[in-house]
Image (spheres, rainbow, N blue to C red):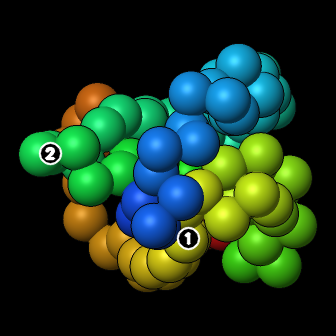
Amino acid sequence: MFVILLKFSEKKSQAAKYMTGHREWLQRGFDDGVFILSGSIKPGIGGGILAFNATYEELLIRIEQDPFVSEKVVSADVIEIDSSKASPQLEFLLDPETNG
């Protein structure tokens, strides 16, 4: 499983220009079964995504396709979590076949 942190750069003011493309990119991640949660990092410093069902390398390629990243509106940090325990609702994240 991965945590993706998208932190605004000095180009934050350009975010509105790329928001439609960013939202479409997010939706593709959900449609492909890679993203399982996304949201804003408060107070307005960027966004966060939980991802799985992809390798680290596949995830890096996907992240580069985000218009916010390619246009340097945000920087992306990826944190890999080797999940070992989960609540019953999240046990699917422990499956080694889908745990990135």
Task: Left or right? Give the position of 46 relative to 86.
Answer: right
Q: Is residue 25 visible?
A: yes
Is residue 86 or residue 79 the one in the foreground?
79
Q: Secondary structure at mark 2?
A: loop
Q: Can residue 53 be seen at all in this image of the molecule?
A: no
Relative image position of residue 70 (x, y in whole percent): 80, 60
Q: Is residue 72 left or right of residue 64?
A: left
Could you say whether the residue bearing mark 1 is in a helix, strand or loop?
strand
On residue 42, which mark appears?
2
Q: Where, by quadrant of the figure, is residue 64 drawn?
A: bottom right
Quadrant for the C terminus, please.
bottom right
Q: Residue at x 47, y 44 (%)?
A: 13
Instruction: Indicate whether 7 appears above or below 78.
Output: above
Cα separation, mark 2 vs mark 1, equals: 16 Å
Q: Position of residue 24 (x, y in %)?
A: 76, 22
In the displayed structure, 3 sits above or below 77; it is above
At 36% from the left edge and 51% from the top edge, which residue is drawn?
46
| Kind of residue sitting beneath label 2 | Lys
Q: Which residue is mark 1?
A: 76
Q: Left of 53 or right of it: where is 58?
A: right
Q: Which mark is residue 61?
A: none
